[in-house]
């Protein structure tokens, strides 16, 4: 049966979004379906209802986005970052007229289903709209934060890890040349996945993430100074410190420049310690610190092999779900394969997390990645010691459900 499906991207952009769009359109076209690209997230529905864009302009043709010269067709999209459809990242619509136009846009386009590519924040918003409008929804998870619940990987995470890892590699040599302590601020919102993965791969000496260090403390500063002093006594004068943006300041408040704050605090503390009569701290007298905030560079770059593959597999799964008329699902990556979970089952947990300001999918403090970092001697904050044995990882769907009343529920 021929279907009319829509596709949109919502929330912050990341590498791999265009690879999803490309695969959805190619596979849907092979099935004889029509695909409509909704520009700028759900705002595209408003533009359509208000006559600012036509149905024909929304229809993505089989030949796709042609470029001048020899590069033509859809396939070029898999190499491009950002989103050719544009995205929306301005929160939940409150205006009833706006909501009405969004719902009317889906209806007027006579869509059989909508594929939404977004993070958990977008998922929350679009799920509510879908419920109000009676939409048939399938969601594909994307975020460099890797904090969407129930999926071990999201589109964009792998490329972001590569970007941060490369930045740490580059900063190593300037840090070594000037014998400096480099403090690097990494994105991730309230999750430390990006900092932890890229920090390990990039040779960081210290990694501070919100799951292990919710905020800076005097003990953390002392621990960092002790670590730096030990490095210097061993003959190394430079160090790399990775700090996730979700780590708060000494006052417990969010600090958009937490790397700069930490760099200043470290320099001051090292100088103070060097002025004491303790021989172990004499080496801290000339400590110099610099802060680097990587910012939106982490959202850029050519998608890696894995992001292109996972984007393509997610897209095919989404189209298959629509073909089976199995709607209101979240496509996930779990145990090395693609699957899906019912939105009806998992949304209560996600909404509860948002209401309580809890990350839906944090780093497991007792998990394999934390153990790996500790095994390399990476400083993760005070009171983080090496377990006696490697942990046996539970599935992401089990370990990432913080709400006690949902533990043991069947999200299928």
Image (spheres, rainbow, N blue to C red):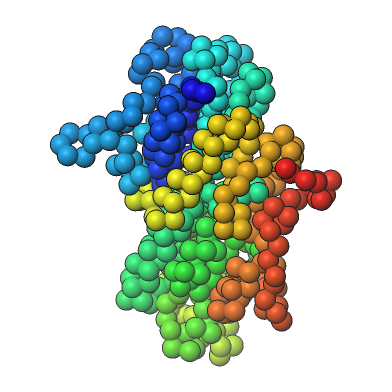
**Residue 351, x across and y down, in percent:** 71, 37
351 with respect to 325 (left or right): right
Residue 195, horizontal then vertical, whole percent: 52, 60
Q: Residue at x 61, y 14 (%)?
A: 96
Residue 123 rendering spot, x and y as whole percentages: 60, 35
- Name the residue furthest top: 51
- Residue at 61% x, 22% y is 135
- x, y (%) of residue 228? 52, 78
304 vs 20: above or below: below
The residue furthest right is: 405
Question: Quarter holding the C terminus?
Answer: top right
State left or right for residue 389 relative to residue 197: right
Residue drawn at (61%, 29%) of the image: 325
Left or right: where 170 falls relative to 106:
left
Q: Nearer the viewer, residue 329 or 300?
A: 329
Say whether residue 152 is left or right of residue 32: right
* Position above or below: 391 against 354: below
Q: Is residue 195 above or below residue 136?
A: below
Mark yes or no: residue 212 visible: yes
Foreground of the two, 202 or 130: 130
């Amino acid at each position: 049966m021929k279907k009319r499906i829509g596709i949109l991207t919502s929330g912050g952009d990341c590498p791999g979004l265009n690879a999803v769009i490309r695969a959805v359109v190619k596979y849907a076209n092979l099935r004889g379906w029509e695909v409509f690209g909704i520009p700028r997230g759900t705002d595209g529905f408003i533009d359509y209802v208000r006559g600012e864009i036509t149905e024909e302009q929304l229809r993505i043709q089989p030949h796709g986005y042609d470029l001048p010269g020899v590069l033509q067709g859809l396939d070029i999209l898999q190499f491009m970052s950002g989103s050719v459809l544009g995205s929306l990242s301005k929160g939940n619509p409150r205006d009833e007229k706006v909501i009405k136009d969004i719902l009317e846009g889906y209806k007027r386009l006579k869509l059989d289903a909508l594929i939404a590519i977004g993070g958990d924040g977008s998922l929350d918003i679009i799920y509510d709209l879908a419920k109000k409008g009676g939409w048939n929804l399938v969601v594909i998870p994307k975020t460099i934060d890797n904090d969407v619940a129930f999926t071990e990987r999201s589109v964009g995470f792998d490329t972001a890890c590569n970007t941060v890892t490369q930045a740490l590699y580059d900063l190593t040599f300037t840090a070594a040349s000037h014998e400096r302590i480099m403090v690097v601020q990494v994105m991730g919102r309230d999750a430390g996945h990006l900092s932890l993965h890229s920090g390990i791969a990039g040779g960081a000496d210290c990694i501070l993430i919100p799951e292990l260090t919710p905020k800076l403390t005097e003990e953390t500063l002392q621990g960092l100074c002790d670590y730096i002093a030990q490095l210097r006594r061993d003959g190394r004068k430079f160090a790399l410190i990775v700090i996730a943006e979700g780590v708060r300041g000494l006052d417990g408040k969010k600090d958009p420049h937490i790397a700069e704050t930490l760099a200043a605090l470290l320099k001051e503390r090292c100088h103070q310690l060097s002025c004491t009569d303790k021989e172990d701290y004499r080496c801290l007298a000339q400590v110099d610190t610099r802060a680097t905030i990587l910012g939106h560079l982490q959202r850029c770059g050519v998608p890696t092999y894995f992001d292109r593959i996972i984007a393509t597999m997610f897209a095919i799964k989404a189209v298959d779900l629509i073909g089976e008329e199995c709607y209101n699902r979240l496509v996930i990556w779990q145990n090395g394969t693609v699957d899906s979970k019912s939105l009806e089952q998992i949304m209560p947990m996600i909404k509860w997390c948002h209401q309580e300001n809890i990350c839906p999918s944090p780093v497991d403090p007792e998990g394999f990645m934390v153990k790996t970092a500790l095994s390399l001697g990476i400083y993760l904050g005070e009171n983080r010691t090496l377990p006696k044995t490697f942990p046996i990882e539970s599935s992401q769907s089990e370990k990432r459900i913080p709400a006690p009343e949902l533990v043991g529920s069947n999200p299928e």
